[in-house]
Image (cartoon, rainbow, N blue to C red):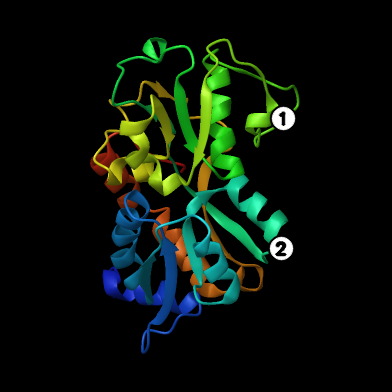
Amino acid sequence: MSFRPAPVRSLALGLALSLGIGAAGAETIKVGVTPGPHAQILEAVKPIAAKQGLDIQIVEFSDYVVPNVALDSGELQANSFQHQPYLDNQVADRKFKIISVATTVNFPIGIYSKKYKTFDEVPVGGSVAIPNDPTNGGRVLLLLQDKGIIKLRDGVGFKPSVADITGNPKKLKIIEIDAAQLPRSLPDVDAAGINTNFAKEAGLDPVKDPILREDPKGPYVNVIAVRAQDKDKPWVAVLVKSYQSPEVKQFIQDTFKGAVLSSW
């Protein structure tokens, strides 16, 4: 008897069954994201997961706090919007019982300006807006230090605050603003450090428009988070495998052209 390859559908069904997700009734999960790239990428993940018996419902949030609250309370089964230092800080501060189960993408943060083409043009005493949460605000401060613009206290780690600035030759005024509102602040400040997802949503080009841009390195790779009690459930493995697929990697490369970098 000659060998005949199994149809793709059968292979997908076999994988779904092996992961404990039945084909008769697809399992549905709610995944929280912020608008922009995180939501776009998860839309690309959806059909891949659906072939493996997992129906993903995408829930968008306009800030960085509520998605973890909703996940911890069980309103969501997972979220995909934050890097590990931010998650660590949230867990420490709020005692959430949530953990990361996979890395996703990196968004090198940028400093933008509507008034100047380079940071050297920002005047003495100029205003620089940064995110008002410790990890993302600290990330911008570290970028400013890396570019030789300010100096931070030794040993600050990944969460420096304005109080940790020990050198500020240009006497910059650092203004802390909610991350989602930073694009709107650009007309009112000399420069602003803006996360890539919010920059893209505001029509900024995260590759061409920043007057300073973070090197794509360090601990700021984003993650998929779930409740600790769910980490070994079969749908988690399906979600991770679907996200970290060749098709999604290609989607990221084709869609974001270097503004967003896959971690796998």
In this rendering, the answer to whether 81 lies above or below 105 is: below
Q: Residue at x 27, y 43 (%)?
A: 202
Q: Is residue 255 left or right of residue 111?
A: left
From the top left corner, tell me how far across and down residue 5 is, in percent: 29, 68
The three-letter code of the residue at mark 1 reads Val
Is residue 2 visible in the rendered image? The answer is no
Query: Could you tell me how far apart the alpha carbons at marks 1 and 2 are, in whole angstroms?
Result: 22 Å
From the top left corner, tell me how far across and down residue 234 is, in percent: 53, 74
Q: Nearer the viewer, residue 231 or 241?
A: 231
From the top left corner, tell me how far across and down residue 235 is, in percent: 49, 73
Q: Residue at x 56, y 77 (%)?
A: 74
Residue 116 found in image quarter: top left
Q: Is residue 7 left or right of residue 14?
A: left
For numbered disc 2, what is the local secondary structure? loop
In this rendering, the answer to whether 163 lies above or below 36 is: above
The three-letter code of the residue at mark 2 reads Lys
Q: Which residue is mark 2?
A: 95
Q: Which mark is residue 30?
A: none
For numbered disc 1, what is the local secondary structure? loop
Residue 194 found in image quarter: top left
Q: Which mark is residue 156?
A: 1
Residue, far right: 155
From the top left corner, tell me how far across and down residue 190 is, in percent: 38, 24
Q: Nearer the viewer, residue 193 or 43?
A: 193
